[in-house]
Image: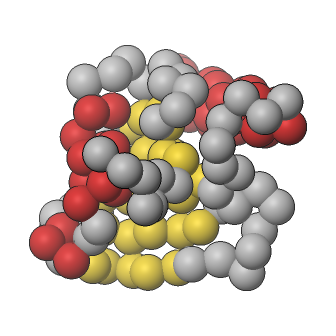
Amino acid sequence: MKVRLQAALDEVHVKFEAQKNIREWTWMMQKGELKTNDVIRVEVNDDGTVSLYDFTLPSKGGMKRLDMPQEDVEPWIMESISMLRIAETNDLVPELGFKVSDTLYYILNREGEMR
């Protein structure tokens, strides 16, 4: 029972930290410190496919694409999560995103950026 309680508390903490990061992003967007207000939730599924959810702030009607093979996902999305994989859980990289877990990421939409 103690182990389950600790696991539940850890999960609540992770969700709280993720919400804190999203609030920080929202504040940065309102101040004009970030070029976009488009946020995408990226989930890497157990079978290696990727599910994308548009969390645009505020929502523009959103994108929802489920179970996409990684080779069909836009390269900038895969690059973003590759960079975030080395970050600590919930460490906000302001112009990139943050990792909730090894399979769940929130990233800023960088579509169309010049390299």
Q: Is residue 21 left or right of residue 71?
A: right
Q: Quadrant of residue 76?
A: bottom left
Pinpoint residue 56: horizontal percent, then vertical percent.
69, 61
When the figure is inspected, residue 6 is found, relative to residue 111, above or below; the finding is above
How many labels sit on residues?
Answer: 0
Q: Nearer the viewer, residue 11 or 106?
A: 106
Q: Quadrant of residue 68?
A: bottom left
When the figure is inspected, residue 73 is found, relative to residue 89, above or below; the finding is below
> Quick check: can you spot residue 16?
no
Residue at image position (53%, 79%) is: 64
Residue at image position (43%, 61%) is: 112
Residue at image position (29%, 45%) is: 115
Q: Nearer the viewer, residue 13 or 17?
A: 17
Pinpoint residue 88: horizontal percent, then vertical percent.
37, 18
Pinpoint residue 69: horizontal percent, then vertical percent.
18, 76
Pinpoint residue 50: horizontal percent, then vertical percent.
30, 67
How has the structure been colored for display?
secondary structure
Q: Is residue 11 left or right of residue 16?
A: left
> Quick check: can you spot residue 28?
yes
Q: Quadrant of residue 67?
A: bottom left
When the figure is inspected, residue 1 is found, relative to residue 42, above or below; the finding is above
